[in-house]
Amino acid sequence: MSAYGWVILCSFIGPFLLSFDKKVAFYRIWRFLFPSILIVGLGFLIWDEFFTQLGVWGFSPDYLAGIYLGHLPIEEVLFFLVIPYNFIFIYLVFQAYFPKRNTIIIGNVFKWLVGLSSFLFALIYLVKPGIGATLGFFQYYTISATFIAFLFTLLTFNKSWYGDFAISFLVCLVPFFIVNSILTGSITKYPIVWYDEIHIIGWRMGTIPFEDLFYNYDLLLPLTWLFENFRRKHM
């Protein structure tokens, strides 16, 4: 199995085996989860394919199985199944084990923090591109990831589940840093997933581009929105 494949498998196996825990019974809501993953994943695969062709990011063949969908390795395609699955699992575990939770305050703080920061980053790097400007390039990753984060924050601003989402997202930063640091080269000779410095700010959290925080948010927020919509229609 490829290195990227091992990362995906190790990320998935724990949440999958625990999906049959009686208290959470995650398997019972798969019918609401998988349509959500399919819709969001399709959008991200298009984004991913487009940016791969642009050279904003890419993949090191030595760490891949060699099976591709378009320009995307099969491991990258599976990423958009496994990470959303794992997140909703954590989201439901939090709800099941903390039934008397109050997440309104932290949700409000988090939405304002993400909303304002994403708006400022999108505006700054659209109006004033960085080192690539003289070559006709903008920080495409920075602008797209932050603008989408701002847009989805506006659209979900008054959602009752946003506080639960915020807590779950913060909890998921632990596996996020582990997985993404491996993918961006913390323990390999060169990155499994690489980024063209022209298209990013250049800030790194270890080996992880700063923009990955917003990208992760962009993936998981609409996923949660769709999942809650599908679930509540059948309650």
Image (cartoon, rainbow, N blue to C red):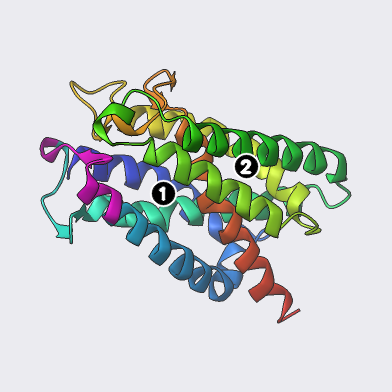
Quick check: 154 above or below 138?
A: below
- Residue 149, how many percent across, how many down? 58, 47
Q: Are marks 1 and 2 in contact (CB under 8 Å)?
A: no
Left or right of 94? Residue 12 is left
Which label was assigned to residue 169? 2
Specify the segment rendered in magenta.
50-62
Left or right of 155? Residue 31 is left
Q: Residue at coordinates 53% horizontally, 41% vertically from top-left?
A: 146
Residue 130 in view of the camera: yes
Q: Quadrant of residue 119?
A: top right
- Residue 102, how many percent across, how many down? 88, 45
Quarter of the figure that contains the N terminus:
top left
Give the secondary structure at mark 2.
helix
The residue that mark 1 highlights is 13
What whole-number distance in Å separates the C-alpha atoms at marks 1 and 2? 20 Å
Q: Amino acid at mark 2?
A: Phe
Quick check: 11 above or below 173?
A: below
Q: Amino acid at mark 1?
A: Ile
Q: Residues within 10 Å of mark 2 (few under 14, many from 20)?
A: many
Q: Residue at coordinates 60% horizontally, 70% vertically from top-left?
A: 29
